[in-house]
Amino acid sequence: MENKKVVVITGASRGIGKAIAQKFLSEGFCVVGISRSRPKCQLSFHIQADIKNEEDRKEIISKVISEFGRIDVLVNNAGVGIYDTWEDMDLGHLREIFEVDFFAPVHLTKLALPYIKKSKGTIINVSSAAGELRVPFESGYTAAKHAFHAFSETLRMEVDNYNINVITVTAGNIKTGFTLSAKGSKHPPLLPFAGKRKELADEIYKAYVKGKKKVIYPSWYKVFIFYSKLFPKGYEKIIMKIWERSFEKREDKINAQKKEHVFSSSSSVVPVKRTDRVE
């Protein structure tokens, strides 16, 4: 692996991180995956760590340099969501969101920068459409991603003189298990036209090869982001309507399950198991 470029990816055990890892691996890179649990996918090297922990973050970079002596690409991908109102949000959960989605990638980047300067490498920050939009009931996550987005954009300007490229990835609705691990009492609406992890990974790799500064995927989010800035009131009405309809559908489903449970019980049939999470 001496002649291979080294890419370090957080949250590489599943979802978008796994797809990015597999893409870079297929292109001949040495892929170092970071995750709390051992991934089931193929990697060149795995480091089991919790990026919320400051000492773990130091250990990650130390192990990579000890093993490979270089870092060519850092992919800050790991993230966690929260769905709640500001009024009901648990502050402990909010602090955890900012630790994972903001402070961890900032610290890892600071630790990796001396080595990325040497390699004149690339930093890829996988953010979210929430980093450019205003999303109610997802407000804590939106705040964290806005901060992460600002970090990525300002970092790009600061390191440009070192021939380091910083790519800000604005990921929209993607088919992953992200909502299953999210915190909070709300449940996100089911949105149409979900993107695919593999396609996003392909777009990120293309941006890396071409030296682009930004990736927005699915591409139709470009129109939505532009509309939100041009017609802010119209955007807010649309986004609130989407959430309100989601709440109504969820309530209808729960009521239907209650009726089916009552009917099944009176008919001496095994009751339908209630599901509190609607995906």
Image (tube, rainbow, N blue to C red):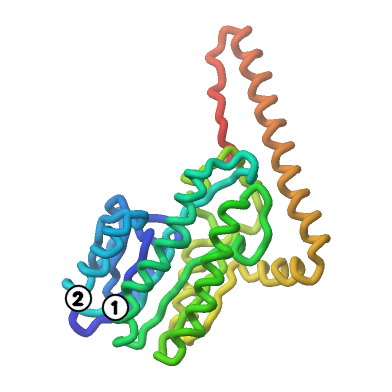
Res. 206 in view = no
Q: Position of residue 195 (x, y in %)?
A: 57, 61
- Disc 2 element: helix
Is 2 located above or below residue 91 in the figure? below
Along the line of sight, which residue is nearer the eye, 150 or 33?
150
Q: Quadrant of the C terminus?
A: top right
Q: How far across and how far down the image is residue 11, in percent?
A: 38, 59
Left/right of residue 158 with respect to residue 139 in the rendered view: left
Depicted 73 relative to depicted 45: above or below: below
Residue 211 vs residue 254: left or right?
Answer: left
Residue at image x 64%, y 13%?
A: 262
Q: Position of residue 253 (x, y in %)?
A: 67, 31
Of helix, strand and loop, which one carries label 1? loop
Drawn side of residue 192 relative to residue 31, left or right: right
Q: Type of residue at label 1?
A: Ile
Residues 87 and 193: in front is 87
Residue annotated with mark 1: 71
The residue tagged 2 is: 68
Distance of label 2 from label 1 (alpha carbons): 8 Å
